[in-house]
Image: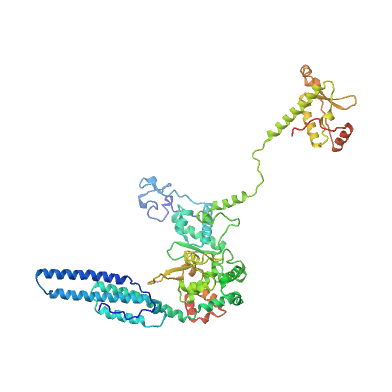
């Protein structure tokens, strides 16, 4: 049962001052039931009186959060902490970490998804799969919607094999040979330029950086933070190797780099 | 000396539009020349014909600095223009440029020139970094064209090379097949969470992203319910039936009374009155309505000499006088009529048309 440390617990609780107003504890001689406004020392707390949570209420709230996270993940855009606070948790900001923890557990044990922070201290979260893909999965996995993962993986391969960055010009030069043009509508991908330079970037799979001292401006691609969480250099190397029908060790430099990464 | 050329030769065919450094240079020069002129005028006015040696030295200094700045700007400009060349090829141009900048720097004594030197260094180091990257990727033995070819082989479309010139010329279905095959392989190397969707769908994706809570689920349920539903009764109108009955009874009573008035002494054969030779169900209805008439006392039914039921009007005066239901001795009769009976009666009595005309 999740209980917020409250004034009624003051005698037994640890904090030395009231959480709501900061009045030092030794001012009181007895515990108060309704918050320290009753004491007259400080104004009424701006947050509503937090009562003890029943197990059911807690379950409900956690379920809401899980549902929120699952739906927000549809677009694959990282979920901001502020968004979670605004829509789900609202008034109970200080127990946010506990809630998130519970929701993360739920997601892991029920769905097999891991809730991770995109980057340390970024306050943005994504869902990744904890289950390694298996042969039998192949039919079902990644079969929803447009097959963008294939395109993404090819680009990730290009980036890594080329030394962890590649210019946009070279990427388009390559993709042209596969029938994907920056200015022509594609039957599957629609607007490929938007998909690659905007959508993948917003989803944090890729970084789209300006190469300095170029005029007209030329951009380059690098791996984004989400890529590092969802896959790794060795996996991408293995993908490339498989396509070539060769061994990953055939590319010494990349192989060493991938080993170091693990 | 003003037109000393840059040691790097610009690439042939370069359309060089004067870039910013030149403009700044010219502006500066004009400014400084003005300063010099004013000095000269001042000196002239004093009557002293030669410039003060200190001033002269200052002037020479300024000229020197202007040169240095001009050189730097030219150097930066040249390097920028030849960027591709420097990075891609194994040329020594970058080293040469750096050496030149080194020489220039020896003469630098003031901030203004030092700033330009720093600017050049930034440019040179960025280019150096790119050159290193290029070297790195050259050593990685990764050929784009090969990658492209093996992709086709991997997917199983190598026969295509004979068919069409470019991949884009081909069928959409082939493209579909290609990308789906690649997709299958790619997803097995990524730990991507599958996207969550409600089975029965939802409204526009934007909505669900903005308010993705329990109410969302309720909405999708409702959506389901609003599908094809049978016509609902707005309210159950029980009264309507009763009204209809009353109306019908009144109507039939009216008919009966009309008949009685027309032929006052001729009683109506019950069967001839109620039977509708065209419809058994209407016959039954008629019997039903007539029973009300009899119950309410507007007519009475009795057996004539042939033991067949007949309808007689009740005299209202009679009703008043003997308005004691008890004295009348309420009798109840049950008439049963099967389809066969009905048909028999029609043929026996030779009923050809209904006496009670339908209101519809």
Q: Is residue A238 left or right of residue B260?
A: left
Q: Position of residue B13 (x, y in %)?
A: 39, 77
Q: Is residue A132 left or right of residue B123?
A: right
- A48 or A194: which is nearer to us? A194
User: Residue extending furthest left?
Assistant: B47
Q: Is residue B206 left or right of residue B276?
A: left
User: Residue extending furthest right?
Assistant: B306
Q: Residue at x 60, y 55 (%)?
A: B200
Q: Is residue B58 left or right of residue A91?
A: left
Quadrant assignment, res B87 = bottom left
- B103 or A245: which is nearer to us? B103
The N terminus of chain B sits in image quarter: bottom left
Q: Is residue A65 above or below residue A258?
A: above
Number of numbered callouts drawn: 0
- B345 or B241: which is nearer to us? B345
Residue B313 visible to the viewer:
no
Q: Position of residue B66 (x, y in %)?
A: 24, 74
Q: Is residue B338 above or below residue B143?
A: above
Q: Position of residue B307 (x, y in %)?
A: 89, 27
Q: Position of residue B287 (x, y in %)?
A: 80, 31
The C terminus of chain B sits in image quarter: top right
Residue B208 visible to the viewer:
yes
What colouring method underlies this structural image?
A: rainbow
- B57 or A92: which is nearer to us? B57
Q: Is residue B305 above or below residue A122?
A: above
């Amino acid at each position: 049962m999740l209980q917020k440390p409250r004034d009624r617990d003051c005698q037994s609780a640890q904090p030395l001052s009231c959480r709501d107003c900061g009045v030092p504890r030794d001012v009181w001689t007895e515990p108060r039931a309704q918050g320290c406004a009753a004491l007259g020392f400080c104004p009424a707390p701006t947050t509503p009186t937090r009562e003890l949570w029943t197990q059911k209420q807690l379950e409900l709230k956690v379920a809401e959060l899980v549902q929120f996270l699952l739906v927000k993940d549809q677009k694959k855009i990282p979920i901001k902490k502020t968004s979670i606070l605004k829509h789900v948790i609202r008034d109970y900001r200080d127990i946010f970490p506990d809630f998130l923890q519970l929701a993360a557990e739920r997601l892991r044990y029920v769905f097999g998804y891991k809730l991770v922070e995109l980057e340390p201290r970024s306050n943005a979260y994504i869902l990744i799969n904890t289950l390694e893909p298996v042969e039998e999965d192949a039919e079902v996995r990644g079969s929803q919607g447009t097959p963008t993962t294939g395109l993404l993986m090819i680009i990730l391969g290009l980036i890594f094999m080329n030394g962890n960055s590649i210019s946009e010009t070279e990427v388009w030069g390559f993709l042209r040979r596969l029938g994907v043009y920056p200015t022509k509508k594609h039957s599957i991908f629609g607007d490929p330029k938007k998909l690659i330079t905007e959508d993948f970037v917003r989803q944090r799979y890729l970084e789209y950086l300006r190469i300095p001292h170029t005029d007209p401006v030329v951009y380059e691609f690098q791996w984004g933070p989400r890529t590092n969480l969802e896959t790794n250099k060795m996996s991408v190397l293995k993908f490339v190797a498989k396509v070539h029908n060769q061994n990953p060790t055939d590319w010494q430099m990349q192989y060493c780099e991938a080993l170091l990464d693990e | 000396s003003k037109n000393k050329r840059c040691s790097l030769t610009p690439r042939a065919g370069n359309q060089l539009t004067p870039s910013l450094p030149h403009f700044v240079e010219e502006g500066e020069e004009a400014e400084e020349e003005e300063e010099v002129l004013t000095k000269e005028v001042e000196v002239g006015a004093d009557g002293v014909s030669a410039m003060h040696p200190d001033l002269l030295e200052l002037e020479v200094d300024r000229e020197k600095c202007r040169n240095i700045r001009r050189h730097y700007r030219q150097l930066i400009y040249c390097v920028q223009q030849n960027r591709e060349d420097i990075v891609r090829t194994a040329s020594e141009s970058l080293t040469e440029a750096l050496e030149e900048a080194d020489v220039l720097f020896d003469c630098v004594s003031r901030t203004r020139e030092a700033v330009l030197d720093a600017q050049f260094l930034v440019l040179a180091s960025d280019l150096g970094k790119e050159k290193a990257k290029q070297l790195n990727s050259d050593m990685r033995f990764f050929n784009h064209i090969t990658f492209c070819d093996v992709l086709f082989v991997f997917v199983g479309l190598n026969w295509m090379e004979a068919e069409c010139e470019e991949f884009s010329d081909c069928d959409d279905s082939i493209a579909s097949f290609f990308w789906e095959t690649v997709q299958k392989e790619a997803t097995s190397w990524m730990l991507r969470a599958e996207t969550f969707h409600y089975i029965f769908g939802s409204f526009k994706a934007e909505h669900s992203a903005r308010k993705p809570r329990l109410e969302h689920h309720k909405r999708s349920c409702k959506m389901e319910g609003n599908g094809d539903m049978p016509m609902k009764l707005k309210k159950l109108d029980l009264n309507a039936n009763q009204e209809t009955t009353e109306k019908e009874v009144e109507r039939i009573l009216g008919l009966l009374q009309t008949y009685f008035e027309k032929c006052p002494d001729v009683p109506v054969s019950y069967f001839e009155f109620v039977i509708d030779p065209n419809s058994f169900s209407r016959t039954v209805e008629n019997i039903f309505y007539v029973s009300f008439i009899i119950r309410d006392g507007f007519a009475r039914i009795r057996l004539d000499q042939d033991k067949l039921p007949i309808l007689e009007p009740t005299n209202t005066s009679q009703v008043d006088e003997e308005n004691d239901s008890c004295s009348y001795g309420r009798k109840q009769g049950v008439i049963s009529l099967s389809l066969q009976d009905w048909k028999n009666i029609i043929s026996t009595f030779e009923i050809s048309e209904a006496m009670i005309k339908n209101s519809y």
